[in-house]
Structures are given as structure tokens and as C-alpha cells.
Image: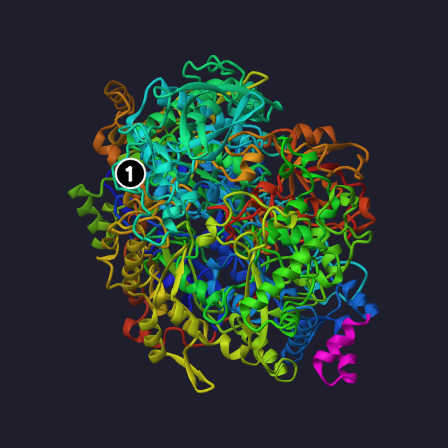
Amino acid sequence: MKRNVRAHVSMVFHLDKCLGCHTCSVACKNIWTDRRGAEYMWWNNVETKPGTGYPILWEDQEKYQGGWQREGAKLGLKMHSRLGALANIFHSPFLPTIDEYYEPWTYKYDNLINAPAGDEQPTARPISQLTGKPMNIEFGPNWDDDLSGSQVYAANDPNLKKISVEERELLLKFERLVFFYLPRICNHCLNASCLAACPSGAIYKRGEDGIVLVNQEMCRAWRKCVTGCPYKKTYYNWSTGKADKCILCYPRLEVGKAPACFNNCVGRLRYIGVLLYDANRLEESAKKPPEHLVEAQRELFLDPFDPEVVAEARENGIHDGVISAAQGSPVYKFVIKHKIALPLHAEFGTVPMLFYVPSLLPVAGTFDGQTYKVAEDFFTSLENVRIPIRYQASLFTGGNEAEIIRVFKKLYAVRAYRREKQMGDVSTQELQRVLEEAQTTAEEIQEIYHLTALANFEERFVIPPMMREQAIEATEDVYAHKGHIGFGFLRKPAREW
Amino acid sequence: MGWIQDIFSPKTRKWEEFYRNRWQHDRIVRSTHGVNCTGSCSWEVYVKDGIITWETQQNDYPTINKSLPAYEPRGCPRGNSFSWYIYSPIRIKYPFMRGVLLDLWQEAKEIHHDPVKAWQAIMENEVSRKSYQQARGKGGFRRVKWENVLELIAAATIYTIKKHGPDRVVGFSPIPAMSMLSFTGGSRFLQLIGAASLSFYDMYCDLPNASPEVWGEQTDVAESADWFNSKYIAVMGSNISMTRTPDAHFVAEARHNGTKLVVMSPDFNQVAKYADWWVPLNAGQDGALWMAINHVILKEFHVDRQVDYFMDYMKKYTDGPFLIELRENKGSYTPGKVLRANKLERYREEENGDWKLLVLDSASGEPRMPQGTIGFRWQKKKGQWNLEQKDGQDGTEIDPILTLLSHSDEILQVEFADFADDRSLKRGVPVKYINTVSGKIPVTTVYDLMLAQFGVSRGLPGEYPDDFDHVLPYTPAWQEKLTGINRKTVIQFAREWAETAARTEGQCMIIIGAGVNHWYHQNLMYRAGIVGLLICGCVGKNGGGLNHYVGQEKLAPVAPWGSVAMALDWVKPPRLQNGPSFHYIHSDQWRYEGAFSDYTQVKEDNPLTQGHTIDANVRAVRMGWLPFFPQFNKNPMEVVQEAVEAGATTNQEIIQWVVQQLKDGQLKFAIEDPDAPENWPRVWFIWRGNALMSSAKGNEYFFKHYLGTHSLEIADEVAKDSVQEVVWREKSPEGKMDLVVDINFRMDTSALFSDIVLPTATWYEKDDMSTTDLHSYIHPLSAAVPPCWESKTDYQIFQLFAQKISELAKDHLPEPVLDIVATPLGHDSPAELAQPEIKDWKKGECEPIPGKTMPNLTVVERDYVNLSNQMISFGPKAREEGIGAHGLSWKIEDQYDQLLESNHVEWNGQKYPSLKGAVDAANLILYLAPETNGAVAHRAFLAEEEKVGLPLVDLAEKTKGIRYNFNDLAKQPRRLLTSPCWSGITKDGRTYAAYCLNVERLIPWRTLTGRQHLYLDHGSYIAFGENLPTYKPNLDRNAIRDLVNSKPEGKTIVLNYLTPHGKWNIHSTFYDNERMLTLSRGIQPVWLNNLDAEEIGVNDNDWLEVYNDHGVVVSRAVVSARLPRGMCLYYHSPDRTVSVPKSPLRGNRRAGGHNSLNRIRLKPVNMAGGYAQFTYGFNYWGPPGVNRDTFVLVRKLEGKPVW
């Protein structure tokens, strides 16, 4: 089959560097969802794992029926077939309720300034942003933050089903518990199930960069996208009556700036760059069994240095600037070249374009009733890992443990190699063993080290030229556009924004 | 899957302008957040339609060097939520006054045309005074006009100055570095009128006392990029992911460069997630762990095998080789003072011979007097204050002997206190007998004492442990019962640590913070860790050091800033008060506890170690160790007047008269009777901080005794029988403060409880500057929009106060007035040599001599009519006397004159460099600071060369041409230059690490020996048994009186109450921010262990009542096994304004905040003074406001919360 080369702005989150600070969430909130109808939306949120997340238990597709499922040789939306969608158009039984997101609240702040003289200190009590009435806060968008070892939240993480009962119990104990962070935005999936679920055809992927958008003029508030997205990253704006979702800050990308959540990531764990892929192979790839999905997805991506790929890309109208961005893409390096970044819940079948480098975690310890003893490994290790590999495999590889082990070995090799290089306190034999086991080379290690530790923002954010003049030219003369852009009255939508 | 089609056509995508329109903005301005978070991050503030809409992070910090991760971006979710405040419903837009006071004022003004008389009328009517005091915090604010409120403030200030004295006016504003000009506005005002500025760094317990103890330095640490240079990092008491958010990446990245990270923390905290090892030691046992680590290192790397690098380092840079006199006591020996040079015939005539110290030289086998000790610092002949191993008398080379083991005359049994088991152990120590002018005395070295203290026997007889498994101080086996950590883990850690240090020559570091520093014995815990660094040569090395980050204390351009901020350009000395003592005493918290010897283990053989804390504080004040304001039980201006009336004609005679009055008891120190009305503080200005909540340890005592409003404490006043030095008044005063003025942009607790609230510009509405120790840049705050509504900048507001006071002064204080200022013996001054022995003049042990045996007394002149003029003018004293810091100073006449030409103000026919606007002040400071003007750095290094006697000026040669002004900073943050005011080297792409200048250029530390101190021979430290690094147990929970009147109610559990810094707030700022409250749980919850919760029937998110004798908190529970049993975390610092229900247990009154459950306990040994590095400096020395040794009862709230 002939290749159909496309360019996609893709992402890597290096979880080992995530400190769970949520600056990304706030950066996004300030710019995009700080308005009526969007109060409860967090296009970017950060979850503590193990945990239940936002909306609560979003990973549980038995509950929410998001994403794709294989039916024999076919791939269909889990919520129902396309025909079924039309039949059930007025009924969305699997939508999260507002309580499963959370009822947004504020406080009666003005009471502090305006309270009349009395016998008691005034307070600003919580009130609902929806009703304005006093409310009892029972859930929030980040409710289980840092909350490992919780019988209510951590214990109900759907991924824990993949590990043994004993392992699960251990994980909830003080001596053995662990947590790490999982920042989430829209994955801008290649096989976006929100898009597939939309009865109005309002959702589309932008051809030049793959960003998934909801056309705010075409959206008819069916909310099928909300159910369709297994990551629960499309939201319904109750004020405008439209679906709203992460737009990957395309207005920033279009002026060469990284999305706000990337720009403001103080853990420096976010990378953005172009991947070239073969659109003709998508269907075949998405149908692979879960444990092969990671590999299958990698095979979709093309080598941007391959002259044939470059020629075909040009033929497909991909700008030279985009091709060179693809060649400098940190995402390409993490995902394809070094194979250490993995998609989240590949088994959902959406072919997400956001990849995660898993987090290294401290070694385990044991408590003998009197004292606590830490395992003797110098660095964190696979042998004494605090959380079973199967848990990570459930998150990132559709259950494929070998993929996770491979990544860990490589990350370990980077640390051992770098220590040896500076300290000389790792034996040559040991280093050789580590490199061999990780199937890596000094050269690859140096590149991973550089990308992980040193890459500055120009290297982390390789943003392709968006060629706005060409896009604008399609509808009007650019020179004329330059003269009148911004003039005129803003047109309010039928309801409001 | 034919339906996944990309859309290319722009025609069908015209709607995309929807989000583009949102993104469009009009302006981006560089600013930051002035919030004492130590981040000091540069931000882009976006303005759209004249409104601030959001902020994103700048990423244009100049690169230090390419092999390091860069400083970009910097920020955190709190900073990112700041734009919420600007137009939020909690914003203070107008001046407000409590209605009760406003009515009284208007009434009084109708009767008295003169505003000062009007204020006097209110003050002299106790019913009136009580009426508005009792209304404090209870609503009833009314909007008032600036003009009216300024008149009241000026009248109250003048009334107080005349009636009680200017030192009854106090001001509080924390940490200048975060917005140094906003601080300056107020501090300059306070110092010009003669008021007292309250310290903050020690009050917050951010001051690590071990730093002055060991290094003679307030705090000096590595910038965060230097973490990347470390090869082994131990993090303890510091949750860098949460509290050093923009810096944490350097640790994450270092790991990928082969660095090992060990996190020592009782809970699985956010930084443990990064660690290779998480060591869950018991809370507050960090000291015990490090004592044992040091035991292992000393045994294996100093004795069994000797690492040359370590030995060499100990000799050169620590007091290890200095000789200590052993004192005989009932058949055994105890370590005493460092042997003084003038005790030897050879050095008898040396200048400052009491302050020059001896080591044993290996070549001559004789005691020799190395250069660089404190006596050389303050002698007439300059140039010998350096760390060259030379004899100070004849310049011969010295090779100091570290241990006397193979040179000893005898092995003596020396007593070492074991506070953990309340006993002492006798251990053999090698001794040499030295012939002194007063006979033969046994001495040993600090190093030998240290080995014995840590229990490393070297085959010497005595109560030494046999091996690591022997449970005796301080073996790995010994620490197990305290820390809960297995000895094998401790041993392995120690070996890895020391191996790494040996291979890298010192690239092991400790990152440490409040989690350790807030315990009563914080100084000992820190010293235990510091020993682990010193014995491995890790201080003064890039990638090493004790890196303590608690508070944004580093104000880089300190020399010129200090001159402006403390008004040294007009009047010297300033009135600077250590906050912890001030609040402990004035808010009457001392009344609620008995003798400190009841709750902490002390050696019982010395009167210094017995009794009540306030007595120790009284002695410290009269001996000149600590400041205290008000000074005397009389208005100091009246005192001068009386002296003049008694015939004193010169300042010296006035001082003599005052000394005599004090000696005769005619005049008393105010601290001797703090509850007498004439000794109360009266007017309090608060700005840039939350003095009545997050800074108010013992919050309820503040409310009761300062404000006179409701409070939630139920503690007994029990001090009566244990105090001796203070007057006990049966009835404790309530409502000491006549007027509390808060300058604020949000209605926080301090605003809510103040009499007057003035609207201030936020950090996005003013020009200012910020620096921190976490990075090496200086960058600005700048106004994205003008101050909103009726707000004004802090800098402007105090000028307005000054204008109004000057106006009223024409009638009330028309002529310049003489004032007498009492200040303690200061650090970095010749007073470091004041008191070789502790002697109390009050007890007749010596004569009262100002500046020697008692506080300095200085007569100064205050000119209230010209107050407003002085505020905006850089005064002539700066030109005459120059500027400086840390004991270094240099001349600035030429620069002063250049400033006059470029930007001046003129009054009374005289021109002065302008300080009128904040930008004027910024440019003046940048121009005069070595850190921002290369020519000044050059000049300052020349001055330092003269003192030290070694070449240094090369450090400033290359950067001589660099000069920054305020506009430069607005364009891009600028890297600070290497400066002798600091100890790191930033040139040639190096990261700043503390004490590199000392190690590389042989500049002494500002201590007794000029070296880093393992041993502290101040009389107090010997008395308290803290002369050697040691372990002391945490306070006895049955004796600290947290839970005397508070009883279990139903299912209740007692927990240790810990208040680490939180994730969703920086102190109380951002706590009330809707954004942050949404990401937390809508409240600051109380975290507790699941089994503890189960015991009291508490489920996640249940409401709790947390209480003790000091107060009560009502909040929600977070239940998690992330915490060990026995403790709860209530993150510092929620305001008590948002979502606070009432407490059924305390009469259904509104519950309190985190500081409602604690009170200040001062550790007397930290009051030591008059001696070398133990001399007073503002925020440098004094007992900190420790708060971790606190216990609470926790129960489920009965019924639904009542609002």
C-alpha cells in the first residue's frame, strides 16, 4: 500500500521528572476555562497514582464505556455502534455526573469585608458556583492528590486489579506505599473516539498538526464525545451548550510558543514535537491485540531522515519547515529512536499522541516490627521496585510487561553510565552488564541523558512553522487581512460564552 | 475507520478565531510574586483591555553554563494563580476602618480640632479604648477616605512618641528580599521616627541557629543549579517538590547524571517519590540518625583508614586542631575553653591575646598561634585575618596537629553528657600538659574530643562502644530505638556518603529545611548533619554543603540596601528587635509556662541552665546579648531630657547618667516589668505580611494580650513561682495595642483583626526588585497596570504617613529631639570581643559599661518636621561613613556625588540623591551594590584585601565594566557578580555555593577561630552541654503544658502536631485563592494516618476538632497511610478567614488557624551573646520561634459544622 505521510504535533511527558505541582493545570485554567460553564473543566489535570483521578474512576470503561473495542476483526466504539449512536442520540447513560467531576465552588468572600459589626469573626463559607448556595464540599478535581495509602481512593485505582491481592494490601501500608504523578491533557489521538462519536461532525483533526478540535459553531450539544473519549478529556460547557476541550493552545503554537501547560511546566518534563506517520496504516495498527498496540503504534511512525519519507511528505504538501521540525523532534527521539516513551492505556484503542516515560521510584524497604531497613541497592532497581511492573504495564503498555522492563533497564543504564563516567565507582563489568541488559550504547545513553537532564526549552519544544499566511490566503488576501484583522464587533453565540 | 478524516481546509475552520480571540493580548510585563517563598521567579503578566488576565513564566534567565540544566522556567501553581487576586472579591480596594473606632474618632475630632488631642481623648478613656479593641476581628468595617485615615495614623504616632516614646511604635514586615523596596518604604519610616522593626527570619523559625554557631553566618547556601553538581544528596526536613517547586528539577536531573538521592522523612512525601532511598525515620530524630552516621564515618574514614583529603580539610578549615582546656571536676574532666594565646608567656603581650587561639604545631611540638582567629580580625594591624597556616607573631609556617594520640602526655577520663539516657559517660582522651602563665594545664584538641564524643575509641580506655552493634552513644545500634531505622541502613548510607565525598573531594550535600529546623533542638540536629559534611570536607565545595532553604532571606545588594532601608544615611543605630523574644514577652506567652528546665533535659550544675525562659531573656538584654524594645520603663526622649536637666552636656555625659540610673535602679529595662502599661508596645504597623496569623505563633495569646478581643486559649498562667527577674502582675493585661494598621491587598486575618486596613498595590501593580538564595539573578517586579482602585504602593504609603506626621509635627514636635538608643553587642563589630567570660553587672560581677558588659547606648537626633524630606533623600551619613555589610565597608563619596548630579531632590537649600520613587531607590541601590556594579565589586574586594592580607581583587577584574540599572532588569534577569559581601563565586560559569571564597581564597569565617566550628566554647554552651555536637531528646510532652486543661472528649487521640509548608499556599498567601482551594479540598485539611483515624472513628473528609490548651482548629480529615502513626500534618498556613466553622469545645466561637495550637518556646542557649559569632544581628541571632514539639487532641466534630 502506498504511504500517506502526515505530520502530527505530538507530546512526551517524562513522569520521572513530574513533581505533581499542578502549575500546568493552573496555567491552562487561567487562559481557557476560567468562565461560566467551564468552571468544572480542567483540560489539564494531574493525578496521583495509585488513585482514582478526575472524573473519578475515569479509567474504568465498564463504568463510562469510552474508547474502542475489538469485535472480531472490527474495531467499534465501546459505547455502541455508529448506527446505534443515531438511535440513542438523546440518551447518554454513561456520561459522568457533575458529582463525578465535582460541583465547582467558591466562597462568600465579600462577607469578610462587608460583615456588619457583631460578636463573632466573619468567615467566607463555601458556596456552589452553580447555585450560589452554601454547599458541603465532598469532591474536587484533585481530591486524591498525594493520597497514596488511602482505602477510599488509592485502593480503588482500576489498575490495581492487575496485581495480586497481597501486593495490593502491601501497597496501602505505610512501609511499602508509593505514589507518582500522572499529568493528563487531551491526547489528540490519531484514532480519536470523541471524533468518531460526534453525530454532528463537529469534531475534527486539523490536517496540518493533528490537533483535535470541536467546532464551536457546529457542535449541537449531543455530548457523545464526552462518553466516547475514554480519557474524559472532552467536556460539556453548560453555559454555551457546546463541547469544550484542550486545543493544545493552537493560538500559541501558531505564534511559535509552546502550549501554556508546556511553557509553565517547572519540572521540565514536557516535550513537544512533530511525528511523521503513515495514515494508511492506522486502521490495521489500531486493531492489534492490546499487548502489541505499543509496538504497532511505533510502527506507524516514519523516519524523518529517510529521503523517501521526506519526498513523500513533500508530495503530500508537508512544508519543509515541518519536515525539519520533525527531524529535530524530541518526541521522535523518545518514542521511536530510544523507545522509552509509551502511550497511556493503549488498549483504549484511540492511538493517543501523548507518550509517557515511566517514573523511577525508590527501592522498597522492610519493617521487622522494630526497625525499618532499606533494600541495599545503590540506585532504585527493578529487583526491589516499590510498585509491581504489572501496574505500570496496565497503565502504559496494554499489559505488556516486557516493554516496561525494557524502559526501566534503559533508564537505569543512563544513571549507571553517567555515574561511572564522573565518579569511576561502578565496575567495568557491572557497567558492561547493565548496558547489555538494556541493549543500549554509550551514544544512546548520552542522548537520553541530554534530553532528560539538559534540554533547554528550544530543545524541549520544537514547534513546526504553522504557515498562517498560507492558511489565511485560502479565504482572503493576506495583505488585506493584515489591515483589518481585529476590527469589528465580537459576535456573541446564541447562548453565551 | 474511514471516519477519522483530517480537515485541512481553512475555509471550514474560520470559527477557530474563537480561541484566537481569547488569546489576543495587548501587553506583557515582567513581574514576580513577593511572597517569601524563596522562588523569586520571573513571570510574564498579560494585560488585555487594560485588565490583567493571566500570567505565564519567563524563560530567559541568562545561561550559567551549558553543562548544567537551565533556570527555565521558574514558577509554581501558587504564583500562577496570582492573577485571580487582582479583581477578586477578597481584594481590598479602599481604605477601611473599624466602625467603632471611626465613630470615636469623628466624635473626638468634633470636640478637638487638633487630631493629636483627639487621639489622646480616645486613649485616655478606657471605655472607649476597650470598645474598639473588643470589636477587633468582628466585622463592621467602613470605607474611609485616605485623607482622614492618614490624619488618624499620624496623630496616633505623634501621641505615642510624645507620651510613651518612639520605641513603643513597632512595625512588622517579613523578608525584604522578595520585594526589597516595599519593605524599605516602611522600615525607613520606622527607623527615622525611632520605632522598632521586628525581625522575621527567627520568628518564623527559618533561622538555622547552627549556621551562626558553626559559620558565623545567618545563612549561606548553594543556588539550586548547584544541586546538579552534587553526587550524593540527602534531603531531610525539606519537601523540595512542594516548597522549592521551581528548583526541584535540578534534583530530578542530577539523578539522571548519576547522583544518588536519599530522602529522610517520616512520611512518604512528595520528594520521596524521586528518591533512590526513602528513609522513614521517626519525626524529629534527624539528629540521632546523623550522630550515628558520623560515628561510622569517623570510625571507618578517619580512624581505620585515613582519607588524606578529609584530614587536610579538617586541619585547614575547621577548629579541629585547636586546643581545649580540660577542667577538673570531682576526679574527672570536662572540656572548657579554647586555650588563649595570652596564657602563654610567648604570646602574653599580643593585642587581643584573649581572642587569639592556639594549636599544637607538629614541627616545633609547641603551641602556636595561627592567623585568622577573631583577635586578628579586630586588631589594629590589618592583613593577618586569613587562613594561611602561619604563626601570627613571627609568620612561621604551622602544621597543626589534629590528634594528640601519638603526642599525648597522658590519657584522661573526660565526662561526656548522654542526654538521651540522662547520664554521663567517661571516655579516655589523649592530653598534653601546657605550661601557661598560671601553671600547667591539661589540653586536648577539638578533634580528639569529637572522636570521643562520637564514641570512636581508638583503643583508648573508657565507656566506649565495642562496635557498631553496641548500644552506646552514638553507634548505629544506639540510634535504632530513637529513629526506627535499621543500623544496616545507617552504616551503608555512611559508607556511600563518605566514599562519594572522598572520590569527589566533597560533592555530597544536605538539603534541609523547616521539617528539621522547627524543633526545639533544631540547632543540635543541624550541627549533627553539619559534622557529617565537615568530616568529609563537603563545605565550600560546588555540589556540597548544608543547603538550608527556609525563607527568602538572601537580599543580594545588601550593603546599599541596608543603608537605605535602615535609614543609616540619617540616623544610627537602628532599633532592631528579635521577634521571638518580643512576642514571647509582650504577648504574655511567658506567663503560661514554668521553668524551661521542667521540659527539657539540662545539666544541673549551673545556674544558667535552670529557671524560667524570661529570666534568661532579661539577663540577655541587660548584658547586651539581645535587644529589647521598649528599652526603658520611661520614654527614652524623656530620659535624655532628664539627663540634660541633671546637668549632662555631652552625649557621653548623657550616657553616663543613664548608666548610673540603671545601676541605681532608678531607671529600669522595660523587659523587667513587661506588663506595666508604660512598657507596652502601642502602635503596630503591618505590611507585606500576616503578622496576626501566619507569623503569630501563639495566635490566641496575640488576640488576647495585644488586641484585647476574643481568644480561644484555656491555658493557666503558671509562671509566677518560677520567675525571678521580672515583675509578676497578678492580672495580665489585655489589649496592649492602641492601634493596629495593616497594609494589604487582600482581607487576610491580619487585615480582618486590624483597626485600619489600607489598600496596597499588588505585585503586578508596582516596581520593585527580588533576589533569593535559590538562584543567582536579580529581577524586577513591575507595574503591568497602575495600582487598582484606591490602592497605593507600600513605598508611597509610608511617604504619605511621613508627610502627615511632618505636617502635625510643626505644632507637636517642632524642634529636633534627642533620643537614646540601646542596642546589643553586634556581630561583625569589635563588640565580638566584649565578653571573654559571662559576667552580670546587675549581680555586681562587673561594672556596667555600655558596649562591653551591657548594651550600647547612643544619643541620636530626630527631626520630625523634616521626616518627610529625609524619607525621600539619601542622607549625608552615607557619604561620610560609606556603606558595607558583614563587617566590611568602603567609601562612596565619589558615587554619592555622581548620584547627586544624575537624580536629586532639594530642600532647605541642600541637594540629596533622590529616593522619591521606588525606581529611584532601585537605581541607587543597583549603582552602589558590588553585586550589580562591577566597579563597586572591585572596590569592595580591595577593601577586603586590606583586611585579609591576601590578593582577592582578581575576582572582580573581568566584570569591572558591568553595571545594571532597573531598565536592564526589566529586559532580562541579570546574574549577580561575585562579591565579598557573600561567600560564593559566580564568575566563569560557576554556580553559587556557600563558602567557596573561604575555602579557595582563605578568607576566614566570621567566627571565634575563623574556622568552621565543631566546638562552641561560649560559657552558655558549655553550661548547657552543647559545646560538642550532641543529641538531646525532644521536649517532654507531659511537661510542656499543651494538654493540661484540654481533656479527651469521646473518642480522642493525642498526636504530635506538625505544620510543614503546604502545597497550595505560600504561608497564608494563595491559601484563600479560589484556584488553590479548588485544587486542594476546599480547605486546609488535617492529614492523619488511617489507623489513627480508625481509632477515633474518623473517615476521610470528616470534620475534625483539633485542640489543646492554646486553641482549637476545626477542619476536615485526609486519611492516608502516607503518614506514620502518632502525628498529624496541618500544613502551614491557612488563614482563619475562609471556611472556618465554630468550635463546640470552645463555646461555639469561630475556630482558629494553625498557629492557634502552638505557642512560642525560646531556647535559652540561643540567647548567648557578647562573644565572637555569638553576638546579635537582626535575623542573624537569637532564639527562634520553634513550634514542632507540640501535641494536640483530635476528635471527630460533633454534629454538622456550624457557621
Amino acid marked by disc 1: Gln
In this rendering, would B118 be left or right of A389? right
Please tell me whether residue B992 belongs to the stretch shown in magenta.
no
* Picture quarter with the N terminus of chain A: top left
Residue B485 screen position, x and y as percent: 52, 22
Q: What range of the chain is rendered magenta?
A: B103-125
- Residues packed near mark 1 inside 10 Å, few (<14), some (14 to 19) or many (20 plus): some
Residue beneath disc 1? B389
Q: Say whether residue B838 is visible.
A: yes
Q: Which quadrant of the structure image shows residue B839?
A: top right
Residue B683 screen position, x and y as percent: 67, 66
Q: Say whether residue A13 is visible.
A: no
In this rendering, would A200 be left or right of B579? left
**Marked residue chain, label 1:** B
In this rendering, would B80 be left or right of B1080? left
Residue B1121 screen position, x and y as percent: 60, 30
Q: Which quadrant of the structure image shows residue B972?
A: bottom left
Q: Residue furthest left?
A: A307
Q: Nearer the viewer, residue B1119 or A165?
A: B1119
Look at the picture and state if A339 lies above or below A330: above
Q: Nearer the viewer, residue B351 or A185?
A: B351
Look at the picture and state if A383 lies above or below B153: above
**Number of numbered discs present?**
1
What residue lies at 58% left-to-right and 71% top-to-bottom?
B193
* Picture quarter with the C terminus of chain A: bottom right
What residue lies at 73% left-to-right and 86% top-to-bottom?
B113
Q: Which quadrant of the structure image shows residue B921?
A: bottom left
Q: Callout 1: helix, strand or loop?
A: loop
Q: Dominant secondary structure of the magenta stretch?
A: helix
In this rendering, would A175 be left or right of B442? right
